[in-house]
Amino acid sequence: MVTIMAALLAAGPAFTDFTMADIDGKSTSFKAFKGKVALVVNTASRCGLTPQYAGLEALYQKYKDQGFIVLGFPANDFKEQEPGSNKEIKAFCTEKYGVTFPMFGKVVVTGLEKAPLYRWLLESSKTEQEIEWNFAKFLVHRDGKTVERFAPKVTPEDKALGKAIEAALREE
């Protein structure tokens, strides 16, 4: 019994173990995403990469019926490019880019105050490198453990990202 418990603790948390506040402040358990392929993205509304929202929405629409979800996490970590309130961010995303994928409340994605989810994403992607800018992407596989990292400049239209999403969707 002790050996089983030690093994479970050593395995660490899975993606579905997290609970976070969505953009409206409602607590959201990631258990709702169990068995899905998730693309987790730190976003910003006043960044040169902000137009990626359109591509992220297109990816979500293309693959959502196959078990894919995009999860947006606004962050103000880089040159204060996400200064608005959650309400303002939500309005911007829906009005300017027609975002329908789940958005969450603002988080910190770098440094000592980094959100536990982002600590987990960095550890799970086996990189010590901090997130370098807005729109860093983490692809979480259906198993809730496997994580692939894509740089901010990798656009949602990038063939490598599309191939990785399709491969993850084929996994059971």
Image (tube, helix red, strand yellow):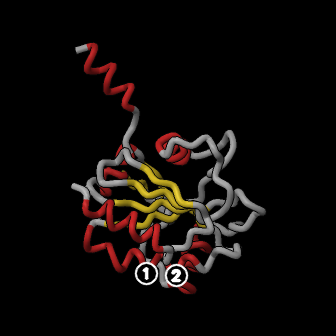
To which quarter of the image does residue 78 belong?
Answer: bottom right
Q: Residue at x 43, y 50 (%)?
A: 147
Q: Residue at x 43, y 81 (%)?
A: 58
Specify few, some or many for label 2: CA neighbours under 10 Å numbering under 14, 14-19, or 20 or more: some
Considering the image in quadrants, where does the N terminus appear?
A: top left
Q: Whole-percent x and y of residue 88?
A: 62, 74
Specify few, some or many for label 1: CA neighbours under 10 Å numbering under 14, 14-19, or 20 or more: some
Q: Is residue 29 above or below residue 52?
A: above
Q: Residue at x 25, y 20 (%)?
A: 4
Q: Is residue 50 above or below residue 144?
A: below
| Residue for badge 1 | 58
Given residues 43 and 102, the one toward you in this image is: 43
SS assignment at label 2: helix
Q: Whole-percent x and y of residue 53?
A: 54, 77
- Looking at this view, name the residue that lies furthest to the right: 79
Residue 24 in view, yes or no: no
Q: Amino acid at mark 1?
A: Ala
Position of 133 with respect to 18 (left or right) is right
Q: Whole-percent x and y of residue 170?
A: 25, 62
Q: Amino acid at mark 2?
A: Ala
Position of 23 with respect to 128 (left or right) is left
Q: Is residue 70 above or below residue 117?
A: below
Q: How many numbered circles are shown?
A: 2
- Name the disc covering residue 10, or none: none
Say if mark 2 contacts mark 1, CB within 8 Å: yes
SS assignment at label 1: helix
To which quarter of the image does residue 65 belong?
Answer: bottom left
Considering the image in quadrants, where does the C terminus appear?
A: bottom left
| Residue for badge 2 | 54
